[in-house]
Image (tube, rainbow, N blue to C red):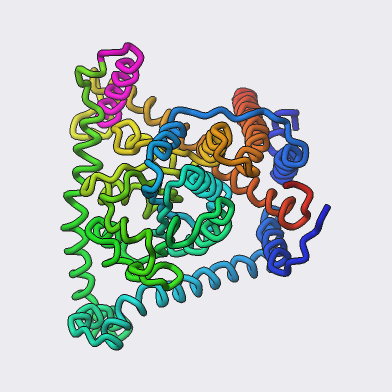
Amino acid sequence: MGFWERLLKIDRKIIFIVMAVLVLFPLLKPLGLGVGSGPRAKAVFDAVDSIPPGKTLLISVDFDPASMPELYPMLVALMRHAFARDVRVLLCGLWITGAGLADKAVTEIAPEYGKEYGRDVVYLGWKAGVDAVILGMGENIKNVFSVDYYGHPLDSLPMMQEVTRLRDIPFMVAISAGTPGFSDWLLYGHSRYGLRVGAGVTAVSAADAYPYLQTGQLTGLLAGMKGAAEYEVLVQRHNYSKAYMPAVAAMDSQSLAHIVILVLVVIGNIAFFVTRKRGR
Amino acid sequence: MHISTDIWTWVAVILTFGIFSFLWKDNPFYKFCEHLFVGVSVGYTIALTWYNSVYPDLITPLFRQGKPLYVIPFLLGLCYFFRFIPKASWLVRIPMGFVLGWASGVAIPAFFQTNVIKQIQGTLLSPALFARWDVFLWALISFIGVICSVLYFFFSREHKGALKVAAETGIVFLMIGFGASFGYTVMARMSLLIGRFQFLLRDWLGVIR
């Protein structure tokens, strides 16, 4: 068996080990490759930045713990950005398994900026019936969520006296790992109530979001961990936060892993064509 | 190094290694973790559905506040359970018909507006696109890509002559699309691996911030 044949039959566990080492190394010893900010992340940032203090940013937490490494840093960075500018944050969710994640963000991030629950931030929780929920929120949020995630009646929360329906919200970001997600907010929130929508999506579904970006239906897009890192960089560059940036910290590992995959794809193709030529 | 003393962090670590063990080969430890995940997810979903939706939106208004109209969704919901009784299983068609009718009526106009009209508008070469050469170039490429990709799926005529050229150009655009999706998928999977490693190094071992 020649060199190329052996290469094609290499034990996949060796590839796993190489990948694990190359992902682990930059986490322990950061390489400082750096992260820039692209126009799509900047568009989301500018939209949040243009919300007047005292107004409300709606964030829909449409993901589960499986997508946490990519999407949770987006949620945290968005909340820090809003709180630093005294923009109120209203959270809700279309994914039942994401309910606890939004709760975690509310309890961890709001105190960092001295924000008070009910006055500066409200978490509505999750409700069944995606289209009915969004359409209901377009008419009257209290009709859909009579109480918030923690059981407080919405009438008892000062923030909810001013935010009664989707038209009271200047901008929203749907952080989605699939369906239901940003596409449902576009279907019902944007097309029917004119809600401006930005999206934070997993890298897997980023390609599906681009057509909506091109038509202007989506204001901006945060795609995968790279999108989260870009937003973290923008938030720190404008001095809205000095906190640890988990997505930025992960980008060195991401870059090394991509280089390895590129090399493996090239080597695999060369080996395939060489062995096929010999076979003839 | 500052190893976590939180029992739940240790549980998560053990389950993480259990799932990773599949990379070596299928084993009972992996199976246990997989079944536990499915069971916990279902249990969590049922509990949250009850406390966030069924109890406050149906049980409370119907039985505690005595609102009689809520008996309609209550009965429609009950009809779903007749699926388990073969002689009365036809009753399940009533709520399904209601849901399908309502959802179609609501979704079709919105879907058409969002995914058809707006997308066609986005593909058209409008005069505004001629203002800058780079914007025009991308719009033109997008326009050609859409036309050729659609023509690839036109099967009413044999792909010969101009149609063949257009269809083959469409394949190039489709391949570029698949390549972009694959690249993003690689990034997504790597992100999940990095996320787990960050958990192990930070939350469990305490060797990174």
Judge left or right: residue B124 versus residue A170. left
Residue at 58% across, 57% down: A108
Quadrant position of the C terminus of chain A in the picture: top right
Residue B118 drawn at (x, y percent):
22, 36
Judge left or right: residue B190 versus residue B74. right
Q: Which residues are magenta?
A: B130-151
Residue at 25% across, 56% down: A138
Q: What is the quadrant of residue B143 in the picture? A: top left
Quadrant position of the N terminus of chain A in the picture: top right
Residue at 36% across, 71% down: A153
Q: Is residue A47 visible?
A: yes
Front one among B63 and A253: B63
Q: Is residue B202 above or below residue A232?
A: below
Front one among B134 and A237: A237
State yes or no: residue A86 in magenta. Answer: no
Residue A137 drawn at (x, y percent):
28, 59
Q: Main secondary structure of the magenta part?
A: helix
Residue at far top of view? B133
State yes or no: residue B137 in magenta. Answer: yes
Residue at 18% across, 51% down: B108
Q: What is the quadrant of residue A212 in the picture? A: top left
Residue B171 drawn at (x, y percent):
36, 28
Front one among B116 and A80: A80
Q: Is residue A54 above or below residue B84?
A: above
Judge left or right: residue B136 versus residue A207. left
Q: Is residue B164 above or below residue B94?
A: above
